[in-house]
Image (cartoon, rainbow, N blue to C red):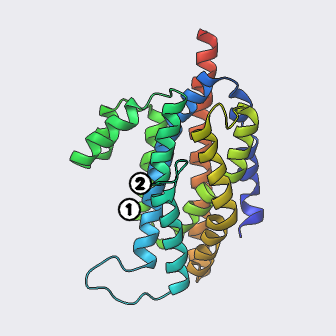
Amino acid sequence: MFEKELRPYQDRLAQHPIYDSIRSVEHVRIFMSRHVFAVWDFMSLAKRLQRDFTCVELPWMPVLNEDSARLINEIITGEESDIGHDGQPASHFRLYLDAMGEVSAPTEKIETFISQFSRSYALGKSLNQARVPAYVQTFVKHTIKTARNASTAEVASSFLFGREDPIPEMFKTLMERWGLTAQQAPKLTFYLNRHIEVDSGDHGPGAQKMLSRSIITPQVREKALRAAIDAIEHRIRLWNGIYREIKKSDACA
């Protein structure tokens, strides 16, 4: 779907210089301390789709499309309560935080943000209080705006093309460049390998089916395409910001 229209944007993302720039543990720390916000805001897209495709209200009512309901419920189960490196249930967000601790990546900003946001639900204010870089704030705000306000098809398109579709190749490339082994960083390699496995094998194809079923008119298709382009472009801008920080750290070393 959208193969021809999205190819230029997908190529720009796949060929981003950030992949070749991450060559040390310090680079990994910079990357993870910024990327963790994308791990967090991903769940808002997933939960919005769960709300649209299933019934999460009381009293319960039958859903219109049980195939899509099953697909999103399976994705939520994996993302919110997967089996972690130690055999215990854990969200992928928690797995990522554990992996950050393993390589001593700073978690202060994401922890401060979660603490502030859980009390106020003021997104911009909480991001500012946590001193989150502006380019990361832009990414998160776009994600939450999409999850809150976009149509089901637009959310499904952003979810697929901004997240599930590019992640397996992105993480494969990062693992190749980082050179970290399972012995050196077992939690991080577990997280990356787990996402490569589920996103390419289950979640990606499932998201593709959900999007296909949501596109019912040419107008809906056009909006979904625009949402896909916006999602990829925001990912590229996020990578741009992290890349600049990595280059700045090298210049100061």
Question: On the rendered image, what quadrant is the N terminus found in?
Answer: bottom right
Residue 153, x across and y down, in percent? 53, 72
Q: Check disc 1: other Cα within 10 Å, few if <14, some if 14-19, many if 20+.
A: few
Residue found 53% across the figure and 32% down from its top = 102
What residue did someone put label 1 on?
148
Disc 2 + disc 1, Cβ < 8 Å:
yes
What type is the residue that disc 1 sits on?
Arg
Residue found 61% across the figure and 9% down from its top = 253
What type is the residue that disc 2 sits on?
Ile
Q: Is residue 106 above or below residue 82?
A: above
Q: Is residue 50 above or below residue 29?
A: below
User: Which of the pair 136/37 is nearer the observer?
Assistant: 37
**For numbered disc 1, what is the local secondary structure?**
helix
- Left or right side of 82 for 141: left
Most extreme residue toward the left is 119
Q: Check disc 2: other Cα within 10 Å, few if <14, some if 14-19, many if 20+.
A: some
User: Which of the pair 192/17 is nearer the observer?
Assistant: 192
Residue 170, x across and y down, in percent? 69, 46
Residue found 70% across the figure and 25% down from its top = 23
What residue did someone put label 2 on?
144
Q: Is residue 217 above or below residue 251?
A: below
